[in-house]
Amino acid sequence: MKFYWNMPSGLQVHYRHELDSYQQEMEKGNLPQAWRQLERAHILGQPWLVQHNHVHWLMLKFGISIKSRKEILGQLLRLIFGGVKSFVGKVPTGNTGGSDVPPLKKMELPEDLENLLRPYRSR
């Protein structure tokens, strides 16, 4: 069995870009756009344990900052259980990671992220 710890370096630059954009939007107080950037980072990071859990940690902190009990609880559960699927390479493609989406629901990928992920899909 192969384990999926860490994102390939060729994809990390795009993942970091989404997280940097998230931070910039948070600094501007643009919460809807900040959340969108976290969702995009989740889509990119979901197949790899380290990045997947990191995004859920940021989503938890976001939930705390907006005082959303639903998001806080949803992210705590995802932090506890979500990494298991990444670890063994079984994730619902395109899932945006928020508590408003069932954790195992497969979703349509945005075209730009689909193009970025395609070379790494042989798993």
Image (tube, rainbow, N blue to C red):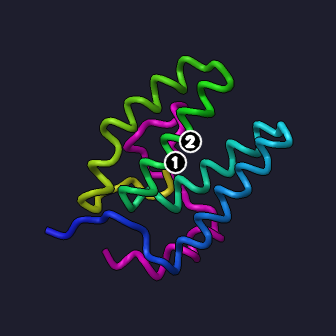
The type of residue carrying mark 2 is Leu
Q: Is residue 2 above or below residue 119?
A: above
Residue neighbourhood size for the residue with mark 1, other residues' Cα within 10 Å, grouped as few (<14), some (14–19), many (≥20): many
Asked whether 80 or 123 is in front, the reply is 80
Asked whether 61 or 72 is in front, the reply is 61
Q: Residue furthest left?
A: 1
> Please, what secondary structure does the residue beneath circle 1 have?
helix
The type of residue carrying mark 1 is Val
Q: Is residue 8 above or below residue 68?
A: below
Q: Residue at x 65, y 70 (%)?
A: 112
> Residue beneath label 2, please?
58
Q: Is residue 76 above or below residue 87?
A: above
State the image quarter where residue 123 is shown: bottom left
State the image quarter where residue 71 is shown: top right
> Residue beneath label 1, please?
55
Q: Residue at x 29, y 62 (%)?
A: 89
> Please, what secondary structure does the residue beneath circle 2 have?
helix
Q: Which residues are magenta?
A: 96-123
Q: Is residue 61 left or right of residue 8?
A: right
How far is the residue under mark 2 from the one under mark 1?
Answer: 5 Å
x and y percentages locating residue 76 in the rendered image:
42, 29
Q: Residue at x 58, y 56 (%)?
A: 41
State the image quarter where residue 100 is shown: top right
Q: Residue furthest right?
A: 28
x and y percentages locating residue 20 in the rendered image:
70, 58
Q: Examine the residues drawn in magenta and state their main secondary structure.
A: loop
